[in-house]
Image: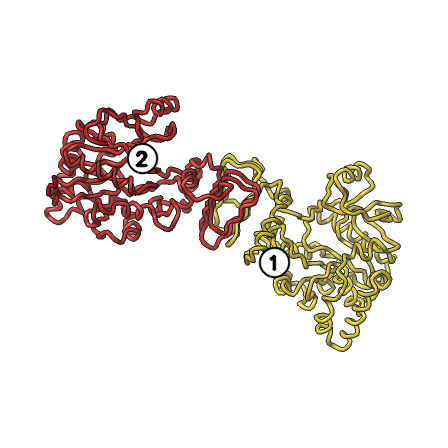
Chain colours: A red, B yellow
């Protein structure tokens, strides 16, 4: 049965100013604007490209910060510039999703919205599109839908979703959301086989999520109503600029998903990675026989398991070292053991404390 | 007793195109042109400055290669440009010393010549000058004189001099020169206390060394006579350019010193270092409480015993690493454990094999 229905919209959350990829990522050039998974394509451009056949460019929206809006638009030339929404200030994901849903609802209130992070890596893009198509179809029926990733290790860095009964082929009820577990819990989840990683992708109709926001986050709903009224008078930008900082800072997960009634989860297994650190970048990179990844002209002598990133034209030579991450840029250089790559946060903190602009 | 005598000349051997300090040192910017001992002063400029009171600039000569002549002259502006002698091709130290001695002998045949490497570090400059003054005085009597350094460790990278009877205060007969020893021999030399490191500094009168060259290296002596004849006709440059490549490639140590009859050694202990590798640079550098040395703005987090060198404006952050040498330049970056710094040779060899110009 083929029904006529509103076009699917995609909302790409691209406000991240993550510091985990310093010094390649900076405040004004965060992770999603970098080609961190190899090749030349910034992660956000890969995210858009992967949506081919699921959402058209004119129905694809990016929510980012004012600081990043121009660079984000430059990295996504296929999108209408007006589809790049700039938050005056970051207030976590609920306001971001709510605002985009309001804008979409003004023309397509019944449209399904796929909310997607801008900065993930997908190994199997066909598999990804199949899972998304299933999630979109489920959302069209009025469910709030998530995608859960089959865990491959007892990861303590992610939230989990417990899978409930199957409600249609490849779609299950989500029994509950679980916070990032400790090691023992994570091992248990992995062993039980009924827990999936929360991928941070959400699917719902515009009217469904706006109803849920009215129910669970009335303060946000009230602001969104003001945005709608202002938009009708052609002065949305001014009101957003004035009100945004007063919105509740809460995630869509906590604020809505965990409280919503009809939540479904589509299990997926398509080479997903949230690209959380340089360690992940090394895992995804093409590596030589000694497990080193780096520019073609890098010199590795008696070096194993190293990850090198450097500007074109820069020769990097590693001799007699093991498991090092070496990230070089024009004005900053990081050297850290691969297993401790998350400690780059300490460097960023130090620079912030110093007031160093190479942040 | 104050005698009238010819002014002392100094000949600085600055032909080295060493690769041990890559990537800071390059073919066209070798060790002696770099401020490797801290501060801003290139090693060759420090060498000149240390000669204050021993040899005047107009009696100080630098022998280098044609490739390095201009940069060397630029680093030593106090010297007359004509005192920078450019070898058309490197033929080890005997031709270098012989040529400089010939030039000096044309005006000051009885002058004492102090032959000094351009790229050593001296911790105690007053002590150094006192030892050199003693060596110069001994050379004036017709001896061939060396300076021997009191060993502080069983070093296998240096040649040794066995000390003989004292012939005047602080001046001994040199019993023999010894090649770089193996570890066991080096331990024995250190224990015996009669062996000194060969510092590569030599002192002799111009007529004495030229006589010795005539006796031990007649082929070189013959070429030097041709240079003299050509100089008298104002066409030395052309003859040097034509003949230099045919000169015997032999060190002044092997070719003359070890065969000369009246060889003396002045023991010295003035914080001498030949600055042989990045390891030595770390040893000489100012270090923080965790034994890290680097630019003032470097970030060391849980890092110990590391040496960092980087261009001004470049922020280097080391996290969770120990004993690493990290040397960054505009177009090349080296990471190697401090104890294996000499393996930089392998990198240089690799670049030479590749034909990479970042050599």
Q: Is residue B306 left or right of residue B218?
A: left
Q: Which residue is mark 1?
A: B27
Quarter of the rendering containing residue B230: bottom right
Percent x, y for residue A282?
43, 41
Can I make out residue A352 in this image?
Answer: no
Q: Write the residue at 44% across / 49% down.
A: A329
Percent x, y for residue A307?
47, 42
The chain that hosts pointer 2 is: A
Q: Secondary structure at mark 2?
A: loop
Q: Which residue is mark 2?
A: A269
The residue lying furthest to the bottom in this view is: B233
Q: Are marks 2 and 1 on the same chain?
A: no
Report the front residue among B108 and A171. Answer: A171
The chain that hosts pointer 1 is: B
Q: Residues within 10 Å of mark 1 (few under 14, many from 20)?
A: some
Can I make out residue A153 in this image?
Answer: yes
Q: Secondary structure at mark 1?
A: loop
Percent x, y for residue A299?
53, 48
Looking at the rendered image, the quarter that the N terminus of chain B falls into is bottom right
Looking at the rendered image, the quarter that the C terminus of chain B falls into is bottom right
The residue lying furthest to the front in this view is: A1
């Amino acid at each position: 049965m083929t029904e006529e229905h509103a076009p699917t919209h995609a909302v790409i959350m691209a406000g991240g100013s993550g510091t985990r990829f310093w010094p390649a990522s900076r405040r004004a050039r965060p992770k999603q604007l970098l080609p961190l998974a190899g090749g030349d394509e910034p992660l956000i451009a890969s995210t858009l490209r992967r949506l081919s056949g699921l959402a058209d460019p004119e129905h694809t929206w990016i929510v980012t910060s004012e600081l990043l809006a121009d660079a984000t638009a430059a990295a996504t030339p296929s999108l209408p510039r007006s589809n790049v929404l700039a938050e005056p200030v970051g207030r976590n994901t609920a306001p971001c999703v709510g605002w985009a849903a309001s804008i979409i609802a003004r023309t397509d209130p019944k449209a399904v919205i796929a909310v997607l992070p801008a900065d993930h890596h997908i190994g199997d893009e066909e598999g990804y599109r199949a899972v998304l198509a299933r999630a979109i179809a489920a959302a069209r029926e009025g469910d709030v839908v998530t995608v859960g990733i089959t865990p491959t290790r007892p990861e303590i860095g992610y939230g989990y979703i417990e899978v409930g009964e199957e409600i249609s082929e490849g779609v299950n009820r989500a029994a509950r959301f679980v916070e990032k577990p400790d090691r023992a819990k994570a091992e248990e989840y992995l062993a039980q086989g009924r827990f999936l990683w929360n991928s941070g992708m959400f699917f719902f109709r515009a009217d469904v999520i706006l109803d849920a926001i009215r129910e669970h986050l009335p303060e946000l709903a009230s602001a969104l109503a003001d945005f709608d009224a202002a938009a009708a008078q052609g002065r949305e930008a001014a009101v957003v600029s004035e009100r945004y900082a007063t919105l509740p800072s809460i995630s869509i997960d906590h604020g809505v998903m965990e409280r919503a009634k009809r939540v479904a989860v589509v299990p997926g297994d398509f080479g997903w990675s949230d690209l959380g650190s340089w360690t992940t970048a090394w895992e995804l990179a093409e590596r030589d026989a000694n497990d080193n990844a780096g520019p073609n002209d890098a010199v590795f002598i008696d070096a194993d398991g190293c990850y090198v990133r450097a500007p074109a034209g820069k020769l990097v030579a590693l001799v007699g070292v093991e498991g090092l991450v070496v990230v070089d840029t024009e004005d900053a250089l990081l050297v850290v053991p691969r297993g401790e790559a998350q400690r780059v946060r300490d460097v960023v903190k130090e620079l912030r404390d110093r007031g160093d602009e190479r942040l």
